Amino acid sequence: MTTCPKCGYERRSSDEIINADECPKCGIIYKKWQSDSAAPNSKFIEKELEPKVSQPVDPDESKINRILKYSFVIVISIVIITSFVIPHIKKYSQEVKTRPGNVALNSPAPMTQEPLNAGQESLPKNGMQEQFVIDTPHREEANMSIADIVRRNTRSIVIVTTPRGFGSGFFINNQGFIVTNKHVLSEEGGARIKTSSGNVYKINRIMAMDDAGDLVIASTETPENEIFPVNLTAMIPEIGEKILVIGTPMGLEQTVSDGIVSAIRTNQQSVNYIQVTAPISPGSSGGPLINIRGEVIGVATFHVQGQNLNFCVAAERIMALQNGTVQAANQQTGRVFKTTAPKDVYCYIDSQWMVHFVDWNTGIMISRPDGSLDKVKYEKWVLDKIGGHPYLINAETEAQEALEKHRGELFKTAFPNKSSDDKNLTAGEQQFWEYKQKKYYTDAYNSAVARRNTAVDRYNYLMLEFNKYSSSR
């Protein structure tokens, strides 16, 4: 039996003990119960234990701490998932998609001169289809420096003077015909030209007039040694293409201005205008608009003051003034001008691949000194335009060469994680690789056949037109 040293309560066996050191009556907690055998006057007195006192806790503060703790755990989890888990999942998914499966291949198609039927090609079961660029030969036009363009064309440009004022113009054939604007040269009476050498020659008569296009073609008395025709082209330039204009703005001879093509405009009369940033001032009207290949692509016509809006009539309008013979009607006077067929014959191909035979310098003259046409020279020019003789295009050879050239790149697209030297392919991978090569070869073959067929059509058309024009002379 033990006794509480404070209240003297004697602990019984029936007491409900929650804590062995706690008195069931007074609740005091002490280190040791005093035994009944101890004398009341015993010197041994158990020292009471001081109850532990804890600091009060704010419930709101505890809640905030828990929220912060959970937030930190969530942020760390998100970082781990986005940095490690998701990339691995994506990588595994891509590997599954690109893993070679059972690829059904047909027997090789016969290599004929007809395009292969793409519908006969089997595709992998995973639906992968490759778009691969096929190498096809092409020609590039040679660009010239501005200095070279100016040197090539300045002798072709003239100053046109009339009783009403002056403008610019340029030679278009070896007969001394010039082109200028109608508003510069509306009548031939008293009109003259001044060449780059400083000599002045009379304008004989207006040979053709285009009211809608504001253009005239006029003959002059210029001697042969001072006639230098420009190289005309009917091709419409691309927007953004670099150009330059040579003229006589405000009487300043041989002034060169450069810029770019800013737009292509068409008016209600279906006249095509090339809008440029190069300035066109009074006196420049009738001067040539030249591209970076030294070709005349238009005629400077007008500008909008204060807006830097400058417009040139496309050179195709000049070529429309003649079709074998030069013939046009002045809508105001009803006069008709006509000349015999020119001695020199040139040709050009427009943007629709239509051939035209004219009497001004387009870069290729197909007539001989006696006026007859040189068919061999013409055919050589045709073959150059279409990129070689069409019957020499071998689709099988071109397709095989293209495959050999791009085999390494093709292997890399089929197996991104393998080296091109790796020959340890599984049966499925080997089947997939054979499929890829066959498909590339087929695409290259069909591309060569299409190019050959187009070249054959163009060659036949161009030679037929030559024969028709030759027989009509």
Image (cartoon, rainbow, N blue to C red):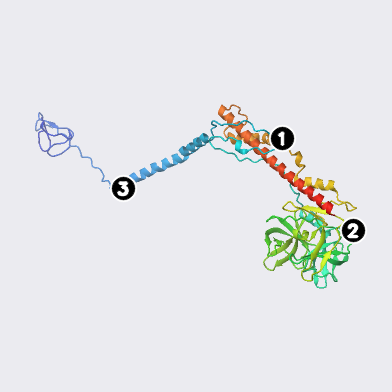
Give the CA separation, mark 2 to mark 3.
105 Å
Of mark 2 and mark 3, the one earlier in the sequence is 3
Percent of width and height locating residue 271? 71, 62
Percent of width and height locating residue 358? 81, 56
Mark 3 against mark 1, which lies toward the viewer? 1
Of mark 2 and mark 1, the one earlier in the sequence is 2
Depth check, front residue: 53 or 125:
125
Residue type for callout 3: Glu
Percent of width and height locating residue 268? 68, 65
Q: Secondary structure at mark 2?
A: helix
Depth check, front residue: 59 or 409:
409
Q: Which mark is residue 61?
A: 3
Q: Is residue 429 visible?
A: yes
Residue name at image x 65 percent, y 38 percent: 443
Q: Secondary structure at mark 3?
A: helix
Residue name at image x 83 percent, y 73 percent: 163
Of mark 3 and mark 1, the one earlier in the sequence is 3
- Please identify the quarter of the rendering in which residue 146 is found: bottom right
Residue underneath mark 1:
397
* 226, above or below 161, in the image: above
Is the C terminus in the top left, top right, bottom left or bottom right quadrant?
bottom right
Mark 2 against mark 1, which lies toward the viewer? 1
Give the CA separation, mark 2 to mark 1.
51 Å
- Please identify the quarter of the rendering in which residue 242 is found: bottom right
Residue underneath mark 2:
225
Percent of width and height locating residue 112? 69, 35
Mark 2 against mark 3, which lies toward the viewer? 2
* 3, above or below 283, in the image: above
